[in-house]
């Protein structure tokens, strides 16, 4: 992995800067309740005028027919299940247009089933067994991109007509955040009609070494310190999709020198821009088999932002951040349990 650095100052989003990440995740897009996918996601600054950066953001992914199931140390089927007579009737008519998020040409029929009349020898009567159901695979590569304007002071995102889309999560300005306490802000403007609150906290490896995987899965800087963007778990309610509860669980770690994401546990890809341009929510597919070091939502592939040393104003009290670190760890453990329950 090599990097061609372009800028070396804190407020460093400028024309030509970019970052690309690989990811593995599960997506939700009504009526799809769960689908594993993997690919790349990234952004590029096309131009900057004052505090406004025009950015191209994109995501590209595939959904293999099988995925590694870390719960059982085996590979599991990755088809989409849909129950209902209407889906079977469409399939029999050669129509696969029942998933709005995907082009019918990108769908491949796995099988369909219908109820059948079976003679019950014990009762001596005919009875109906089975159900109407369809299973399909998503084949081919899915690609989405959007051109947006980002206000770098607030990280609010606007479409090219000036309408607010939400909050940009792919960069923060480290100089805006203190080294003690928490800074409250909006994480998501619109998650199923709800605004998700968040907070930013400073974490140093020197002060607390329990975040070893955070500092291993990143661009190595000269100072082991990050800013952590977490969710406010009291700011939203879960939503039900296809009869299953879904939660917004989040945690993104930013390099303290550049403000770029370097590690994520939770809905790192579930930002307002990605949701707006795809109509999907992405949750992490976390492989816990080899420990926390593998529990990453996305991994940096390429960038030209500089991971320089972060020069702080004063040393601060390292002990004062430990309660927040502990609170974040508790949140992440809850997330891990929720995601393990949802995995198949």
Image (cartoon, helix red, strand yellow):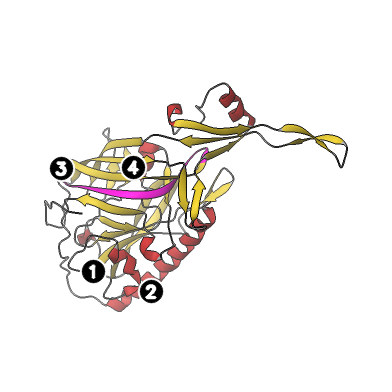
Dot 2 alpha-carbon crowd within 10 angstroms: few under 14, some 14 to 19, many 20 or more: few
- Tell me which numbered mark, 1 or 2, is placed earlier along the sequence: 1
How far is mark 4 from mark 3, CA to CA? 19 Å
Q: Quarter holding the N terminus?
A: bottom left
Q: Nearer the viewer, mark 1 or mark 4?
A: 1
- Tell me which numbered mark, 4 or 2, is placed earlier along the sequence: 4
Determine contact: label 1, label 2, CB under 8 Å. Answer: no
How far is mark 1 from mark 4, CA to CA? 30 Å
Q: Which residue is mark 3?
A: 48
Dot 3 alpha-carbon crowd within 10 angstroms: few under 14, some 14 to 19, many 20 or more: some
The overriding secondary structure of the stretch rendered in magenta is strand
- The magenta segment is 17-32
Q: Is residue 166 magenta?
A: no
**Residue sitting nearer the eye, 140 or 19:** 140
Residue occupying the far top of the picture: 93
- Residue 194 location in percent, x, y? 45, 47
How far is mark 1 from mark 2, CA to CA? 19 Å
Q: Which residue is mark 2?
A: 323
Image height of 189 relative to 213, above or below: above
The answer to whether residue 47 is left or right of residue 194 is left
Q: Which residue is mark 4?
A: 273
């Amino acid at each position: 992995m090599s990097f061609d650095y372009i800028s070396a100052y804190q407020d460093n989003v400028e024309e030509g800067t970019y970052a690309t990440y690989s990811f593995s995740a599960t997506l939700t897009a009504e009526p799809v309740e769960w689908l594993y996918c993997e690919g790349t996601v990234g952004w590029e600054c096309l131009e900057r005028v004052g505090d406004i950066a025009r950015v191209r953001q994109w995501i590209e992914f595939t959904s293999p027919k099988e995925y590694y199931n870390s719960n059982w140390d085996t590979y599991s089927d990755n088809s989409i299940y849909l129950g209902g007579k209407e889906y079977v009737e469409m399939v029999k008519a050669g129509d696969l247009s029942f998933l709005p998020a995907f082009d019918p040409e990108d769908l491949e029929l796995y099988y369909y089933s219908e109820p059948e009349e079976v003679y019950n020898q014990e009762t001596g009567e005919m009875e109906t067994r089975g159900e109407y159901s369809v299973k399909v695979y998503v084949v081919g590569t899915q690609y989405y991109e959007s051109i947006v304007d980002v206000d770098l002071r607030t990280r609010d995102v606007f479409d090219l007509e000036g309408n607010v889309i939400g909050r940009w999560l792919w960069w923060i300005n480290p100089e805006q955040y203190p080294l003690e306490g928490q800074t409250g802000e909006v994480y998501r403007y619109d998650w199923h009609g709800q605004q998700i609150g968040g907070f930013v906290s400073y974490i140093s490896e020197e002060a607390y070494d329990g975040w070893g995987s955070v500092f291993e899965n990143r661009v190595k800087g000269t100072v082991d310190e990050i800013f952590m963007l977490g969710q406010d778990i009291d700011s939203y309610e879960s939503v039900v999709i296809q009869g299953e509860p879904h939660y917004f669980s989040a945690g993104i770690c930013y390099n303290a020198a550049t403000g770029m994401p370097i590690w994520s546990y939770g809905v790192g890809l579930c930002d307002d821009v990605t949701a707006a341009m795809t109509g999907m929510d992405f949750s992490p597919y976390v492989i816990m088999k080899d420990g926390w070091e593998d529990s990453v939502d996305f991994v940096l592939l390429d960038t030209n932002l500089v991971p320089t040393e972060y020069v702080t104003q004063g040393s601060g009290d390292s002990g004062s951040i430990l309660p927040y670190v502990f609170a974040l760890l508790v949140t992440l453990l809850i997330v891990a349990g929720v995601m393990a329950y949802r995995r198949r």
